[in-house]
Amino acid sequence: MLRTHTCGELNINNIDENIKLSGWIQKSRDLGGMTFIDLRDRYGITQLVFNMETDSELCKKARKLGREFVISVSGKVKERSNKNRKIPTGEIEIIVEKLNILNKSKIPPFTIEDKTDGGEELRMKYRYLDLRRNPVRKNLELRHKMALEVRKYLDSQKFIEIETPVLIKSTPEGARDFVVPSRMNSGEFYALPQSPQTFKQLLMIGGYDRYYQIVKCFRDEDLRADRQPEFTQIDCEMAFVEQNDVLNTFEKMVKHLFKVVKNIEIDKLPRISYHTAMKFYGSDKPDIRFDMKFVELNDVAQQKGFKVFDDAELVVGIKASECADYSRKQLDKLTDFVRKPQVGANGLVYVKFNLDGTFKSSVDKFFNEEDLKKWTEKFDAKPGDLLLILAGEKEKTQKALSELRLEMGNRLDLRDPNKFCPLWVTDFPLLEWNEESGRFHAMHHPFTSPKKEDIDMLETEPENVRANAYDVVINGVEIGGGSIRIHDRELQKEMFTALGFTEEEAQEQFGFLMNAFEYGAPPHGGIALGFDRLVALFGGSDSIRDYIAFPKNNAGRDVMIDSPSTISAEQLKELKLKVTE
Amino acid sequence: MLRTHTCGELNINNIDENIKLSGWIQKSRDLGGMTFIDLRDRYGITQLVFNMETDSELCKKARKLGREFVISVSGKVKERSNKNRKIPTGEIEIIVEKLNILNKSKIPPFTIEDKTDGGEELRMKYRYLDLRRNPVRKNLELRHKMALEVRKYLDSQKFIEIETPVLIKSTPEGARDFVVPSRMNSGEFYALPQSPQTFKQLLMIGGYDRYYQIVKCFRDEDLRADRQPEFTQIDCEMAFVEQNDVLNTFEKMVKHLFKVVKNIEIDKLPRISYHTAMKFYGSDKPDIRFDMKFVELNDVAQQKGFKVFDDAELVVGIKASECADYSRKQLDKLTDFVRKPQVGANGLVYVKFNLDGTFKSSVDKFFNEEDLKKWTEKFDAKPGDLLLILAGEKEKTQKALSELRLEMGNRLDLRDPNKFCPLWVTDFPLLEWNEESGRFHAMHHPFTSPKKEDIDMLETEPENVRANAYDVVINGVEIGGGSIRIHDRELQKEMFTALGFTEEEAQEQFGFLMNAFEYGAPPHGGIALGFDRLVALFGGSDSIRDYIAFPKNNAGRDVMIDSPSTISAEQLKELKLKVTE
């Protein structure tokens, strides 16, 4: 071993020991008679001392070492006179007796510091250097720790980890598949899994009643800011369970993770229906770190002659406590905000409930003191509060107000990054209408079961059928979702019909699953959690890329290895493929 | 939850409890007044009792249940009069009070029994039913347990699990890559990793000094009996280590696995060089459960007028203890064996050292008593022993004798499947000549470092350069291998030159790694273990397929989901690809 210790472990208890360390040169200070070097490895930093008086040869050699050189030194541990209380090794230093240069280094293209001078692109190209920085290392260590704790918890609950195949079959349902041409079966392709969904259901049919896997999944999407073509999922399934059993099991997992990773005790997770979430937060992934629930005003705000309200399907608002003193400029900015295309409202109505009990609104022309008083009563508003109101088509207005609510949460510092408020959103609609394809799509996926009491509506009013589907949401981010699956062949057939599959299409794509249902499929359900996003959330970041060792950029490229790339004509020929253009 | 207990846990301590179980009907016996059902789940079997006298309706319903129906029952635990001591639940039975049929089942195409009547192909098509059988379940449980213990051990040694990408870059070195067309970068392809080799080296350069991953790898080979296009590797790398450090670390892991999984204590693993392995076993993966080492006879067997020996590069044999009484017929069978094309010898010479001290050989014409006595002395043979001797070109003869040695090991019951003899084979040649390409190929891979003392021979006699490379072998099976890597840019360049790469080719394919070497690459090395094979070995089977939940067949097909398959014209168009033929 090229070391006896790591750079993070020596302290006052090791005084006078002869030790050997290896690592990288973080920095070096030449003070004339003495040269100090900070030696870094994964575990910390230890100070090395070279003395011109005792060994001038060695000291001269040390002076020539550059940043990021890799060295190995032998020496003695001594107490420092000038102690650094900020690091675990700060009470000692190493009086170096032998120095071995293991490798030189060119000057790195950016500084290996917590705050580096390297831009994103440069750091990605030299990711192996970026990986040396503390913040990146801590992110990957967090990821490791969380994977470990997920496994520990699930193992304790008798889940068995089973690997499902990566080379599977392409199905047109859902997002776009990555495909893999088969050389041995020319003209045919494997697909990379978007999730192990059908395999985990087959495992339930195979009797493995509690399965999990931390598994890579793939989706060939046009990448948005924070998506990756390959991502990692905590994938789980249980048999002989009902919705509550799944919720209880994974609620405990979420609590376990918060406890062991962040030492945070989480109360029981609230469970609210999709309908309630939309009604009060305008979002199926509400951030409930702060209240600011929607209040609907149709009954008190319509039929008073204000056309915008009168024509609206929904008049709805939020209350910003103690914001009645907002200036004209501040209110204009909020109006600009809601008018942004991503938010999509036409305008914003405000009502100031002044401290003196009077009202001032942007619609004073249409509503008198009496009217506005009714509104504030609905909001349970106090003098000093500000009401912000939108109106229009229901879904669009809910969405816009949801954005405004989050914006106000930010402005009022109500979204504390150190506070975590997970919840369950349940009872999602089974289907959603897709304008483009002119048919219903499964909101979750085609194997999700409808609520028993709603099955009769599948043919008559499919849009109102609720699913046994649930999401776990933390701080406004969807961390995972799942459902109780269909385990009955006839119901699955009916579902495929509702989704516009012909019998042949259903048979061709999912025949094996339909067949499996005929041989004693147990009731089952499960969940999948986005592991990258979960880790990012725990790490306090919005970007999953920071928590992936070798991420791809927004064009799906790995700029370090320069991939994807062309392949040889020979490879294409073997695969019996031709690139057209 | 559709049960209060599993089918494997109720016993005499639960008498009179009201419980609920769910599971599959393993079998059912109708004894007129009583109907007994064996209910099965992942955890075991519990006997259910239905009584015509107490509840004839219920009993009649139970009689109609078929094999593999899924049911849920409520009832009371009672002590059995007729106890079954073979199963943990054998002292009790459930007097059923309520029966709920959760799903029906068609009659399965083969019996769900330890010894099933289903052939391989049928079982693969209905893998979800095959998975219900005990032996398959135990295999997957073993796999789970072993993955868990590998992680536990490596975590205890400060290894950090880091996920490396699956969508990487195709390189022509090594086996054939599976490729993935990129839609966003048309005409370009990702490749699936044959191993995370370069990424784990970059992690070392990035400072993560102990990395591991249990990871899927891919190889587009023409499949032999026991290969899979996707397979799982325990992939590890360490920095600041020398060969012995890696060997010691993973020797402990092997011991740990044998101890916790099979309760077997393993002694220190022998370490023998490649040269020694070839000399004494004719194989770089010797089965050392039995001795029977090779003895070379050139000095005592040549120049006696027997042309076959005189013309041979090598005359070499093994001693089969107490086999001097082999009959003519037995010896003929051995001769037939060595002449098989897979073995490749031309003939077999035997010498019987009879119990009375005389000799009888197949070459008595050329060798007298005196000569044969010298041979037996070389073998340290005793009266009653049999010598089996081959001669010819060195490598071919070693290989053939190695096969004969294993065959004799089988015949003499020296290869006890319950005995495990792991060892290290070290000092492999760095390069091997490839007739087809007319150049040297890396025996391990192009990143393996040569022994320091052999570097000078790289240009002059490359075939004699030894590598810092090692394999771990158990019972004649190569379980894993690794090496100390090159961490110096110049040496890596020299290596690429020795492998016949032009500078441009090396730069294009491995430029990112060569560049990384310029920024302080630490000395590092690692190992990769074939997880499928390791589990199979622990499970006592030769076939890795038995230890994979959803394996592919020899044509690389998943016959259950019928994959690979054609994809739509639209998909091909999006990828800008055309299938030629």
Image (spheres, coloured by chain):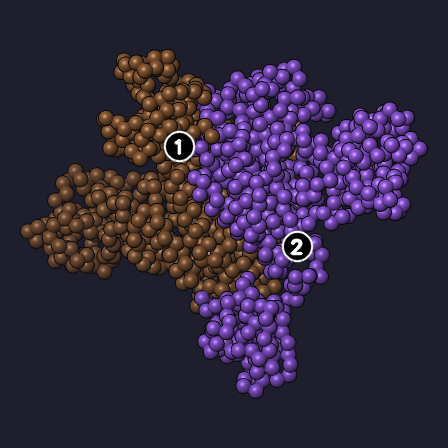
Chain colours: A brown, B purple
The image shows residue B187 at horizontal and vertical percentages of 56, 30
The image shows residue B380 at horizontal and vertical percentages of 76, 37
The image shows residue A87 at horizontal and vertical percentages of 28, 33
The answer for how far apart the CA atoms under marks 2 and 1 are is 55 Å
In percent of the image, x 60 and y 54: which residue is there?
B139
In percent of the image, x 54 and y 35: which residue is there?
B247
Q: Is residue B403 visible?
A: no
In percent of the image, x 19 and y 39: which residue is there?
A332
For this rendering, which residue is in front, A278 or B46? B46
Q: Residue B439 falls in which quadrant of the image?
A: top right
Q: Quadrant of the N terminus of chain B?
A: bottom left
* Residue type marked 1: His
**Residue picked out by circle 1:** A5
Labels 2 & 1 near each other (Cβ < 8 A): no
> For residue B125, which numbered disc appears in the image?
2
SS class, disc 2: helix
Q: Quadrant of the C terminus of chain B?
A: top right
Say left or right for B520 vs B87.
left
In percent of the image, x 51 and y 29: which residue is there?
B242
Query: Closer to the observer: label 2 or label 1?
Result: 1
User: 10 Å neighbourhood of mark 2: few (<14), some, or many (≥20)?
Assistant: some
Residue that sits furthest to the right in the current view: B365
